[in-house]
């Protein structure tokens, strides 16, 4: 039943989005930041509706830990299609995602991602990858935050695990010298992936950790920043983990 209701919700949102695209396009001619703010308000509201219909009981922790006066890099563990929905339902700052380049070709979704100022990464091209980092630094310097999943893909390993974090995922934080916010998401894969193709009512916990300032770290921690942040998120996951 929830799967059918969610399909109806997505259809309604698709229909509503058509006139919103026109309005957002016009606003973007004058201010991309204002367009992003309005887009995030719309998407965040829509994400909360989706989670409500899905029967997801979402507990959000630590949003007050995130600096509001500057852009940050959010680093999160990735196990579900619902992760971005959970992130946007709770994001305490204006933010986009670094996403796979293939999503740029997905109709409807790609337009909202462009309005949200998401960045599309083509892993097959070093030149394009460097361009994404440069664009990301510019966004962060403008006060726009970015979500990154350093595992590189959704993690299907085991029931409660994290794939190794790719060190290259931290170049954006290093070059922009912005704070890193570790983000742990518990149980998101139990909404959909664990019982594909059905939607299941689930308790989900997202926690935003204390900011990590790279300049304050020991040299060994800087050298293996991915491992350092992964351990923090792992401990957050263990703390919030519940067997369901």
Image: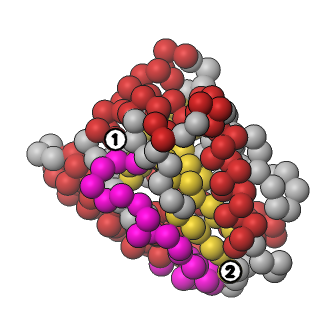
* Quarter containing the N terminus: bottom right
When asked about the image quadrant of residue 83, the answer is: bottom right
Which residue shows up at 70% across the image and 40% down it? Answer: 227
Badge 2 marks a residue whose secondary structure is: strand
Q: Is residue 49 visible?
A: yes
Please state which of residues 81 and 174 is positioned toward the viewer in this rendering: 174
When asked about the image quadrant of residue 183, the answer is: bottom right
Q: Residue furthest right?
A: 158
Question: Does residue 63 belong to the magenta stretch?
Answer: yes
Q: Is residue 104 visible?
A: no
**CA–CA distance in space, label 1 to label 2:** 32 Å
Q: Reply above or below: 78 against 130.
A: below
Which residue shows up at 57% across the image and 79% down it? Answer: 59
Q: Is residue 70 left or right of residue 183?
A: left
Q: Start and end of the magenta stretch?
A: 49-73
Q: Residue furthest top?
A: 127
The image shows residue 46 at horizontal and vertical percentages of 43, 71
Which residue shows up at 44% across the image and 65% down it? Answer: 65
Say whether marks 1 and 2 touch (CB < 8 Å): no
Q: Which mark is residue 70?
A: none
Crowding near the residue tagged with mark 2, few <14, some 14–19, many ≥20 C-alpha atoms within 10 Å: some
Please state which of residues 167 and 144 is positioned toward the viewer in this rendering: 167
Which residue shows up at 44% across the image and 52% down it? Answer: 108
Label 1 or label 2, whichever lies nearer to me, is 1
Question: Does residue 218 belong to the magenta stretch?
Answer: no
Badge 1 marks a residue whose secondary structure is: helix
| Residue marked by disc 1 | 140
Crowding near the residue tagged with mark 1, few <14, some 14–19, many ≥20 C-alpha atoms within 10 Å: many
The image shows residue 64 at horizontal and vertical percentages of 41, 70
The image shows residue 80 at horizontal and vertical percentages of 68, 59
| Residue marked by disc 2 | 203
């Amino acid at each position: 039943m929830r799967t059918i209701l969610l399909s109806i919700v997505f259809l309604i949102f698709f229909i509503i989005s058509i006139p919103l695209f026109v309005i957002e396009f016009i606003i973007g001619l004058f201010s991309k930041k204002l367009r992003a703010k309005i887009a995030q308000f719309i998407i965040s509201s829509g994400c909360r509706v989706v989670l409500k219909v899905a029967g997801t009981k979402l507990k959000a922790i630590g949003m007050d830990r995130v600096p509001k006066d500057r852009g940050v890099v959010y680093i999160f563990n990735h196990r579900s299609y619902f992760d971005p929905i959970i992130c946007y339902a709770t994001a305490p700052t204006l933010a986009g995602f670094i996403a796979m380049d293939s999503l740029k070709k997905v109709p409807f979704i790609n337009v909202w991602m462009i309005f949200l100022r998401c960045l599309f990464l083509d892993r097959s091209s070093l030149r394009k990858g460097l361009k994404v980092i440069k664009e990301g630094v510019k966004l962060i310097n403008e006060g726009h935050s970015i979500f990154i999943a350093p595992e590189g893909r959704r993690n299907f390993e085991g029931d409660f695990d994290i794939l190794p974090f790719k060190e290259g995922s931290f170049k954006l934080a290093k070059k922009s010298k912005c704070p890193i916010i570790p983000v742990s998401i518990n149980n998101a894969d139990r909404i959909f992936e664990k019982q594909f193709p059905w939607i299941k009512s689930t308790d989900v916990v997202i926690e935003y950790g204390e900011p990590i300032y790279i300049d304050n770290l020991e040299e060994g921690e800087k050298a293996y920043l991915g491992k350092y942040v992964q351990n923090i998120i792992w401990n957050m996951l263990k703390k919030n983990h519940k067997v369901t």
